[in-house]
Image (cartoon, rainbow, N blue to C red):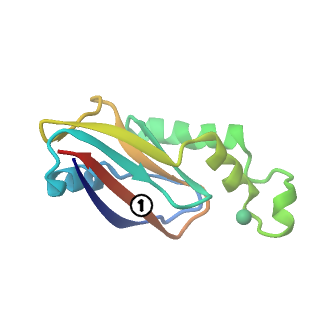
Amino acid sequence: MRVVTKEVTVQSRKRREVINVTSHVEEFVRESGIKNGMVLVFLPHATSALFANEDEPRVRRDYENLFERLVPADGNYFHNEIDNNADAHLLTTIFKQFYVLPIVNGELIRGTWQEVFLAEFDGPRNRRMVLVAIGE
Ligand code: ZN
């Protein structure tokens, strides 16, 4: 069994933004040389998350509306007394900060409408994204 790791930087440009990072994951899987196994995508952050779904302009707006319905940006939060980003922390607890996808015959396995997204909740800033491929 082999383990290959890589860290990439993803730059967000808005406070809340969904960024398609699928190409980073697929490129890493190709570079890794791992033919069968799995890839872990991990964000070492407390105000951003990962999910996998369709990348289409209208559904992107629906994601933004969902975030606002779940945790309104201008809500009344205790943490805002020190940091003014409580909504970002709360959204991050609802979503995952890691994702695991299978690698089969050198290909990343995902559904046709399943792009990997980094969800930024407290941008703009640079986000570290750690990739770990495990297999042979
Ligand atoms: Zn904070």
Q: Is residue 114 above or below residue 9?
A: above
What residue appears at the point 87 percent right and 57 percent down from the top-left corner?
A: 78
Residue 58 percent location from the top left of the image: 45, 37
Residue under numbered circle 1: 129
Ligand 1 within 8 angstroms of badge 1 C-beta: no
What residue appears at the point 47 percent right and 64 percent down from the top-left corner?
A: 12
| Farthest-out residue, front | 1
- Tell me which amino acid carries mark 1: Met
Residue 124 percent location from the top left of the image: 54, 68
Q: How many marks?
A: 1
134 and 114: which is toward the camera: 134
> Callout 1: 10 Å neighbours few (<14), some, many (20+)?
many
What residue appears at the point 70 percent right and 38 percent down from the top-left corner?
A: 70
Quadrant of the rendered image containing residue 11? bottom left
In the figure, is residue 106 to the left or right of 75? left
124 and 105: which is toward the camera: 105
Residue 77 percent location from the top left of the image: 84, 54
In the figure, is residue 58 to the left or right of 27? right
In the figure, is residue 55 to the left or right of 74? left
